[in-house]
Image: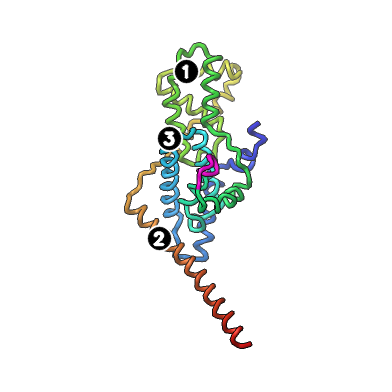
Amino acid sequence: MFHNRSQRKFWTFDNEESMKLRYEPNRKILQQNPRGSDSHEEDILFRHYEKRLLDFCNAFKPVIPKSVVGTAIMYFWRFYLNNSLMEYHPRTIMLTCTYLTQFVGDLQILEYVLLLIQQLNFHLVVHTIYRLMEGLLIYLKTRHPLLENPESLRKSADDFLTRATLTDTGLLFLPSEIAMTAILNSASQAGLSMESYLTECMGLKEDKETLLKMYDAMIPIPTTRWKKHEFLKQEVNTYKMKLFLIYIFFYLSLVNIFLTLLELHCWLRACK
């Protein structure tokens, strides 16, 4: 089912392609305005607002389902593959992503809903890693009797997925690979062997080559994709102020154009 979906076809990339897409909008803006925010500054602000999105969702009572939070973050990542932070402020897009996934917002956010949907190419279905992890745990309970308490893997696996969500992992790996890696990582920390599950329950008993390929595909996720979201407050504030001034400059330019057109209109009327 997943392989026929838009997420697999349009929103799964290799690392080089993902990096190119992320920085191309910034490069185009800087060609027009060299004084704009560079890619490093945008990356800092992006991760800052990504963390704020997570904190914002976690602040709700009752708690927002993790699958909804994961979808909102994935929308946020996808949107800025095609756009620069200097074009659309991350705070507004952050709230718009949240609104789109759980129907919370205000008038300002409503203006950006269609924009967000358009930038996602109307591909709104996200196969979240949290739902797949639930499926794997249920499968372990029913098909892997040698594992006494599969629920003991939940907390560590859930922490793994939360950290993986705050990276571009969802753009580079299949949801099933990420969820499976979370389970295997949790089992490894608990000192449990999952080899019998992979070889017997998944039909890989006689296919060691495929088993090794699965391990090779999963290992890079936790070791290369986690990045800290703790930045110097002064650095974040500096970049936020710079982005604010960019917006002010843009709107002032629009006001000047409007005033010029108004003066021209008045002059033409006076000449009649």
Q: Nearer the viewer, residue 226 or 59?
A: 59
Where is residue 186, by image quadrant?
A: top left
**Whole-percent x and y of residue 160?**
44, 31
| Quadrant of the image containing the N terminus | top right
For marks 3 and 2 on the same chain, the one whose residue lies earlier in the sequence: 3
Q: Residue 170 in the image: state x and y as whole percent.
A: 53, 38
Look at the picture and state if 35 lies above or below 165. Answer: below
Dot 3 amino acid type: Lys
Can you identify the residue that label 3 sits on?
61
Q: Secondary structure at mark 3?
A: loop
| Spatial separation of the CA atoms under disc 3 and disc 2 | 34 Å
In front of the other: 19 or 133: 133
- The answer to whether residue 222 is visible is no
Q: Quadrant of residue 230?
A: top left
**Circle nearer the N terminus (1, 2):** 1
Q: How many neighbours does mark 3 have within 10 angstroms: few (below 14), some (14-19), or many (20 or more)?
A: few
As drawn, the label of residue 242 is 2
Where 53 sits versus 202, above or below?
below
Q: Residue at x 53, y 14 (%)?
A: 144
**Label 3, label 1: how far apart the Cα atoms are:** 28 Å
Q: Residues within 10 Å of mark 1 (few under 14, many from 20)?
A: some
The amino acid marked with disc number 2 is Lys
Q: Which residues are magenta?
A: 98-105
Q: Which residue is mark 1?
A: 150
Contact between marks 1 and 2 (CB within 8 A): the answer is no
Between 222 and 4, the residue placed more toward the observer is 4
Determine if the magenta segment contains residue 101. Answer: yes
Dot 2 falls on a residue whose secondary structure is: helix
Q: Where residue 260 sits in the image (x, y, percent)?
A: 53, 77
